[in-house]
Image (cartoon, rainbow, N blue to C red):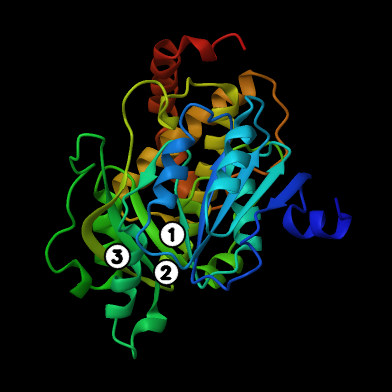
Amino acid sequence: MNSKLNKELCPNGEIISIRKNKYYDKIKPQISICTTIYNRINTIERPLNSIKNQDYKNFEFIIVDDGSTDGVEKIVNEYMDEVDFPVIFIRKVNGGVHTARNVAIRIAKGQFFANIDSDDAFLPNAMSTFIEAWESIPKDKVNEYREIIGLFENENHEIVGEYFPDGINNMDNKSAKQICASIKGDHCSLNITKILKDNLFPEPKGVKYVAENIIWRKLDKKYKAYYINKPLGINYQCGNDHMSRSKKSIQMMINSLYATQTYLNDRKTYFYSFKEKIRTILRFQIAKSVVKSSNTKIYFDYKIKDKNIKFYIFLLYIPSLVITQIYLNKNPELKNI
């Protein structure tokens, strides 16, 4: 592995291998589609097949394996030999999905960037619908936008969450973003690659998951989104495959501590409501209590510097102790770590 390339793609980690199929260097794609993998041998065919079935073909497919140990690379390698579009497969030492996403963003060649999780799938018309929506934005306004946002359906073809309200694309940016954030369920999106390259995920030592909102809400202050009231992906909820079903762990508490202290130290960027601020303070207190009691070494600064937030932490000190105990009783695996 070229050490210079390794440092460029993964400055805080290590690339194991890079493989390109025979189509990879032949076109300049309009879209870079990314899937990151960690031990997804039972679900990886969902996104792989959904990319193969796209009715829009001007794309490259970037697959980043974040240290899998289940043999999933065999499926990916066979897939690369079968398809007739550009694919690059990068294997790296495990560092968390945000570090794998950064690798994909750094190497992406498309004007646009779309991500699909390794246990979900795009619908066949997803990319063509994204492009059609982008081209519908007036030319004199297009520089104000950074993404197209669509909906997910579940495996029973039911919308996950809710539809966007009529007229959302005519609302002011702040109101539209607040509505989008309030709708339960994930959304699928197409982003401008250059903006993502200029705003990569932070890679703090010891953190295995950096919440997407740490980047998205910063960008929301500068750019608009265009909303599509159509399902463009399938969000699989059945069985034990879905990522949200992970058991609570000390690592999850460390991840939460990093995210919540980031939000609380920049409340004007990250909070749309007072309720959201209070809920985040309580999450921060729970995570801090659990992590400190585990005697786990923390490599990032989690001190709260905002005076307004410090005041509310003081007011909520007793309630936070009670809520922490309730949380630990509901998640006994976090006790006596």
Amino acid type at mark 2: Lys
Number of marks: 3
Question: Decide: marks 2, 1 in contact (CB < 8 A)?
Answer: yes
Q: Which residue is mark 3?
A: 129
Residue drawn at x 34%, y 88% is 139
Distance in Å between CA atoms under marks 3 and 2: 26 Å
> How many residues crowd around disc 3 within 10 Å: few (fewer than 14), some, or many (20 or more)?
some
Q: Is residue 284 left or right of residue 139?
A: right
Q: Secondary structure at mark 3?
A: helix
The numbered dot on residue 90 is none
Q: Which residue is mark 1?
A: 217
Query: Would you identify the image quadrant in which residue 241 lies?
Result: top left
Residue 233, image x, y percentages: 32, 48
54, 205: nearer the viewer: 54
* Residue 110 visible at all: yes
* Residue 13 visible at all: no
Q: Which residue is mark 2?
A: 221
> How many residues crowd around disc 2 within 10 Å: few (fewer than 14), some, or many (20 or more)?
some
253, 309: nearer the viewer: 253
Amino acid type at mark 1: Arg
Amino acid type at mark 3: Thr
